[in-house]
């Protein structure tokens, strides 16, 4: 395989390189792996990254526990690399960021509607993979994030079975507060921040995580994701605030609580509490309003493939993103038409996607190129993409996520229950 270190950086003639890549591939862009470390977490070792490369950014930066897909969103890490969180397009011996490609060819890649409204690719997805739970935290909404010149972030989760052969230390996620929790109780946990475990999890409720299912979570809802490897379509922002002072014996600094709050509010407990959407957090029907199970797009199993909705529904009456899981049987082929651009990651098998080879790697070195990630422009998606499984024994499985309002035909949260009756 080639390595990114062997590629020369290209900042000129990006448009020409994009056009060349699209012509050679049948309208697609090959993407290189985008690795992101987190200093406050322990890697779960299920991203297929070589064990020797888990701390490729340096021990002080933390282990690599995330891989971002089709991302034009910078990672909000302290001491980060200038391009951290940005996906690269590879074309021959050249490379350039997907953000550069969108800047130069925006309407042709993300579609005229998304480009005219957002001026960028406003979503991204990732795998996050940890040995244990993430601290209880929330992502600010648009109004709160705007106070620090950022954007709010709704997000979603899907737990691909291919990346969850083990559940690691804590395959349960805490969401919100138990009904009946009072604001005074929550205030006390913030006041007790420096006394050790501030006890905020005592007010929350954990749900057992099941591979092959997911959740849709709006902004300002507290959650402490568990230790399943998670596919996470989300809005293009990296804002958050941590509300748990101690996780698995490790300190969570106050700075991570107030990271995306105005400096004048960093000691203002009233303001910190106001960032919590109280009604959403104490919802007595929380699971019914957020839990997802896959729903087939159509009855196509007899044709050798099945496409399933894995992320669907709306957050505060708006569709921010959706996602599908395509499974193609050994030796089968299908042509899939979609309404908009998408980022795709292969999680099992091998085959082709138009003129591109697809192959799910077993082990990846840091900086190594792979054949498992693709960005599909809107025009290509609408014309139809042909997937062929070249294996005789193993299914080809790929996850793909879409931008806002692309799939008005997507189900609503809870639709899986009606189908199971």
Image (tube, grey):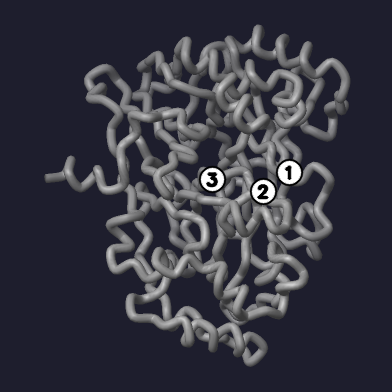
Q: Give the image location of residue 158, x and y in percent.
A: 43, 48
Q: In which quarter of the image is the C terminus?
A: top left
Residue at the spot of label 3: 234
Q: Quadrant of the N terminus?
A: top right
Disc number lying in front (3 or 1) = 3
The local secondary structure at tag 3 comes to strand
Distance between the alpha carbons at the discs numbered 2 and 1: 7 Å
Q: Give the image location of residue 313, x and y in percent.
A: 37, 43
Q: Could you classify mark 3 by the number of other residues whose Cα lies within 10 Å: few (under 14), some (14-19), or many (20 or more)? A: many
> Disc 2, disc 3: CB below 8 Å?
no
In this view of the protein, which residue sits in the foreground, 335 or 338?
A: 338
Distance between the alpha carbons at the discs numbered 3 and 1: 24 Å
Residue at the spot of label 1: 366
Residue at the spot of label 2: 50
Mark 2 and mark 3 lie on one chain; the one further toward the N terminus is 2
Q: Residue at x 45, y 21 (%)?
A: 339
> Disc 2, disc 1: CB below 8 Å?
yes
In this view of the protein, which residue sits in the foreground, 402 or 358?
A: 402
Residue lying at the far left of the rendered structure: 421
Instruction: Name the side, left or right, on which 127 lies relative to 419.
Output: right
Q: Residue at x 72, y 9 (%)?
A: 20
Disc number lying in front (2 or 1) = 1
Q: Residue at x 58, y 10 (%)?
A: 26
Q: Could you classify mark 1 by the number of other residues whose Cα lies within 10 Å: few (under 14), some (14-19), or many (20 or more)? A: many
Q: In this view, does 36 lie above or below 21?
A: below
| Residue 346 seen from this side | no
């Amino acid at each position: 395989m080639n390595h990114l270190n062997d590629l020369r950086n290209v900042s000129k003639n990006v448009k020409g390189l994009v056009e060349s890549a699209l012509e050679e591939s049948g309208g697609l862009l090959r993407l290189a792996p985008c690795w992101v470390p987190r200093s406050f977490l322990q890697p779960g070792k299920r991203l297929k990254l070589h064990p020797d490369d888990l701390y490729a950014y340096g021990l002080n930066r933390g282990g690599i526990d995330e891989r971002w897909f089709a991302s034009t969103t910078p990672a909000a890490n302290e001491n980060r690399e200038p391009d951290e969180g940005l996906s690269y397009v590879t074309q021959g011996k050249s490379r350039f960021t997907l953000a550069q490609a969108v800047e130069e060819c925006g309407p042709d890649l993300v579609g005229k509607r998304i480009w005219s409204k957002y001026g960028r690719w406003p979503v991204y997805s990732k795998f996050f993979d940890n040995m244990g739970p993430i601290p209880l935290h929330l992502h600010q909404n648009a109004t709160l994030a705007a106070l620090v010149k950022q954007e709010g972030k709704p997000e979603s989760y899907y737990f691909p079975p291919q990346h969850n052969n083990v559940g690691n230390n804590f395959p349960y996620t805490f969401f919100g507060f138990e009904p009946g929790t009072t604001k005074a109780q929550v205030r006390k946990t913030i006041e007790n921040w420096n006394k050790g475990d501030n006890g905020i999890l005592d007010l929350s409720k954990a749900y057992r995580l099941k591979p092959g299912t997911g959740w849709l979570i709006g902004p300002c809802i507290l959650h402490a994701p568990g230790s399943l490897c998670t596919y996470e379509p989300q809005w293009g922002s990296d804002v958050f605030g941590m509300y748990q002072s101690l996780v698995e014996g490790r300190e969570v600094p106050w700075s991570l609580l107030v990271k995306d709050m105005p400096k004048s509010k960093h000691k203002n407990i009233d303001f910190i509490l106001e960032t919590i959407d109280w009604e959403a957090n104490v919802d007595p029907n929380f699971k019914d309003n957020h839990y997802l199970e896959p729903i087939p797009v159509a009855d196509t199993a007899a044709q050798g493939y099945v496409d399933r909705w894995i992320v669907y529904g709306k957050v505060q009456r708006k569709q921010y993103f959706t996602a599908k899981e395509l499974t193609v049987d050994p030796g089968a082929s299908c042509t899939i038409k979609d309404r908009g651009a998408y980022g795709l990651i292969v999680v099992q098998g091998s085959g082709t996607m138009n003129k591109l080879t697809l192959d799910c790697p077993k082990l990846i070195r840091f900086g190594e190129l792979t054949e498992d990630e693709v960005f599909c422009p809107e025009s290509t998606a609408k014309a139809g993409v042909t997937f062929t499984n070249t294996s005789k024994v193993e299914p080809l499985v790929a996850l793909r996520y879409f931008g806002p309002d692309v799939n008005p035909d997507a189900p609503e949260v809870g639709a899986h229950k009606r189908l199971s009756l």
